[in-house]
């Protein structure tokens, strides 16, 4: 059913689009396109055959219709992320503002559920650090799950209000504010956004965005970039905030060169995607370079506050589980969970640990129970896992059984820890005890849907 638009919104869009309004309105009455972005670190042969590409992202593809993603094992393995196509344009922005290939420190300040963070993780040059932050606690679980699935060890998570980062002023090369907004650009996809829309809500969003941007811009290192995006059309949340950053806060807008056939419309300092001009939803973005300030001057402390180094023997055992175990350093939480992070990022993580009250969450590797090591689910999904570990390749039905946390019967399988794998991608751990096969999928990750009904 075509969505009923609030009258004030309709009038504003008519004024904004003029004669194009009818095409915009007609686009909102069509089915929203469905798109995915492939994980370049988890390739699966043939997955994109016959799919039409998203013009602005080499790993972005449109699907002919919306499948039940829950029933696709490759989705659970992190083979792709289901992402609205317009927002994938941020990759082109990043490419143009940072053409070099040197390591960067990036902060995604409003990260849940993780669409832009996974995009950033795949784009960032080797050796970079990405901190994905989400202030709303209840949204952190899905963010962590999605980042665990994506599998990158240089990606860390936190849950702070933007102002809590003030000890890191001038530290990050890239700060992304994908701001909470009035969501006008999602009206076709999300009818709840239509019901929540009001002029007051737009004004509230606009001032909240300004508060977030005021904190965010200070975190950018001299020469670094602030990226601002929303999924809305109105000038209060878009142009006016962008102008404020440029005129009153002294940031330098970055002009981008985007092929005309993409259909992205320059709008003041920034750029807008409209559903009648692109195959995607409404999206706005603007990029700014920070040319002022002195940069971060802080020094790392010697040790992590609440995390202990791993014992020598236990550290040596990591070589059994990770492909290049000596590229990482390891820490242990008070509950004895072993964590890993790239050794090259140690000093940076010490800085984050000192500056942020609760530090950041790092990737879990597992836990020692006496002499035994219990591998974490995040390790199964890690792109750094050892390639020679025993595994069982499962067909789609058995994969779904595994993902429902059922115990499989696999008489030929070797004993001990085994990776459940589908089309070359790991789904999780099983342990073959000879007389039974235990399924180690975390219970919160299991498919709850009745798979026989679909
Ligand atoms: N970047 C995400 C992605 O691509 O998957 C989407 C982010 S969504 C547009 C905006 C996020 O901002 C939400 O997760 C919301 O919880 C968070 N948020 C809400 N209030 C905030 C605040 N005051 N400061 C920072 N983020 C906030």
Image (cartoon, rainbow, N blue to C red):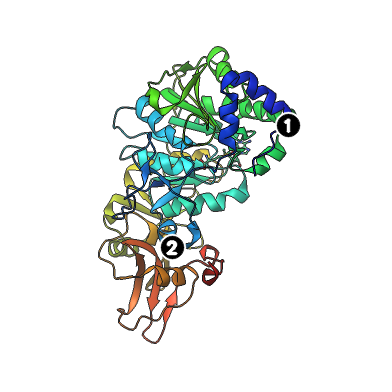
Q: Quadrant of ligand 1?
A: top right
Query: Does residue 63 appear in this view?
Result: yes
Task: Please tell me how crowded label 1 is: few (under 14), some (14-19), or many (20+) other residues with Cα within 10 Å.
Answer: some
Viewer-nearest residue: 99 or 173? 99
At numbered mark 1, what does the secondary structure look like: helix, strand or loop? Answer: loop
Q: Is residue 350 above or below residue 148?
A: above
Viewer-nearest residue: 2 or 382? 2
What residue is drawn where x is 60% and y is 24%? Answer: 21
Q: Is residue 91 above or below residue 271?
A: below
Question: Where is residue 366 shown, x and y percent of the image?
Answer: 42, 63
At numbered mark 2, what does the secondary structure look like: helix, strand or loop? Answer: helix
What residue is drawn where x is 39% and y is 76%? Answer: 431
Viewer-nearest residue: 146 or 34? 34
Question: Where is residue 225 shown, x and y percent of the image?
Answer: 44, 25
Q: Is residue 128 left or right of residue 403?
A: left
Task: Please tell me how crowded label 2 is: few (under 14), some (14-19), or many (20+) other residues with Cα within 10 Å.
Answer: many
From the image, state whether disc 2 or disc 1 is nearer to you: 1
- The residue at which mark 1 appears reads as 198
The image quadrant that residue 395 belongs to is: bottom left
Residues at marks 2 and 1, CA–CA distance in whole angstroms: 43 Å
Q: Is mark 1 within 8 Å of ligand 1?
A: no
Q: Is mark 2 within 8 Å of ligand 1?
A: no
Question: Where is residue 266 shown, x and y percent of the image?
Answer: 48, 19
Which mark, by number, is residue 377?
Answer: 2
**Do labels 2 and 1 touch, CB within 8 Å?**
no
Question: Where is residue 201 shown, x and y percent of the image?
Answer: 71, 31
What residue is drawn where x is 52% and y is 29%? Answer: 274
Which mark, by number, is residue 10?
Answer: none
Q: Which residue is most to the top?
A: 247
Dividing the image into 4 quarters, which one contains the N terminus? top right
| Of callouts 2 and 1, the N-terminal one | 1
């Amino acid at each position: 059913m075509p969505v009923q638009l609030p009258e004030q919104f309709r009038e504003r869009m008519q004024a904004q689009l003029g004669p194009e309004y009818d095409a915009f309105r007609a686009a909102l009455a069509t089915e929203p396109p469905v798109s995915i972005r492939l994980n370049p670190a988890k390739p699966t042969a043939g997955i994109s055959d016959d799919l039409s590409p998203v013009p602005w992202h080499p790993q972005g593809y449109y699907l002919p219709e919306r499948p039940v993603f829950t029933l696709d094992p490759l989705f659970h393995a992190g083979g792709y992320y289901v992402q609205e196509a317009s927002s994938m344009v941020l990759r082109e922005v990043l490419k143009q503002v940072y053409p070099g290939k040197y390591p960067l420190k990036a902060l995604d300040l409003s990260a849940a559920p993780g669409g832009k963070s996974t995009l950033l993780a795949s784009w960032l040059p080797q050796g970079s650090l990405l901190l994905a932050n989400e202030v709303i606690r209840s949204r952190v679980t899905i963010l962590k799950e999605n980042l665990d699935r994506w599998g990158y060890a240089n990606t860390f998570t936190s849950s702070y209000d933007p102002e809590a980062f003030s000890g890191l002023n001038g530290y990050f090369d890239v700060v992304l504010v994908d701001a909470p907004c009035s969501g006008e650009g999602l009206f076709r996809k999300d009818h709840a956004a239509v019901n929540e829309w009001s002029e007051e809500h737009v004004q509230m969003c606009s001032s909240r965005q300004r508060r977030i941007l005021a904190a965010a811009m200070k975190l950018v290192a001299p020469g670094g970039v602030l990226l601002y995006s929303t999924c809305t059309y109105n000038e209060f949340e878009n142009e006016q905030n962008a102008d404020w950053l440029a005129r009153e806060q002294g940031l330098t807008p970055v002009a981008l060169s985007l092929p005309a056939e993409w259909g992205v419309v320059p709008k003041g300092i920034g750029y807008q995607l409209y559903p009648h001009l692109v195959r995607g939803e409404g999206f706005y973005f603007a990029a700014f370079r920070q040319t002022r300030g002195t940069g971060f001057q802080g020094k790392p402390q010697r040790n992590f506050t609440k995390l202990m180094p791993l014992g020598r023997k236990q550290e040596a055992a990591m070589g059994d589980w990770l492909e290049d175990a000596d590229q990482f350093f390891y820490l242990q939480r008070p509950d004895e969970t072993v964590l890993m992070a790239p050794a090259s990022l140690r000093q940076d993580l010490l800085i984050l640990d000192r500056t942020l009250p609760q530090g950041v969450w790092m990737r879990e590797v597992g836990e020692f129970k006496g002499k035994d090591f219990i591998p974490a689910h995040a390790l199964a999904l890690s792109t750094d896992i050892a390639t020679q570990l025993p595994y069982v390749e499962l067909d789609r039905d058995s994969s779904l059984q595994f993902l429902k946390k059922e115990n499989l019967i696999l008489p030929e399988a070797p004993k001990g820890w085994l990776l459940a794998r589908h089309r070359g991608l790991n789904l999780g751990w099983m342990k073959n005890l000879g007389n039974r096969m235990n399924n180690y999928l975390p219970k919160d990750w299991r498919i709850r849907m009745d798979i026989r009904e679909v």
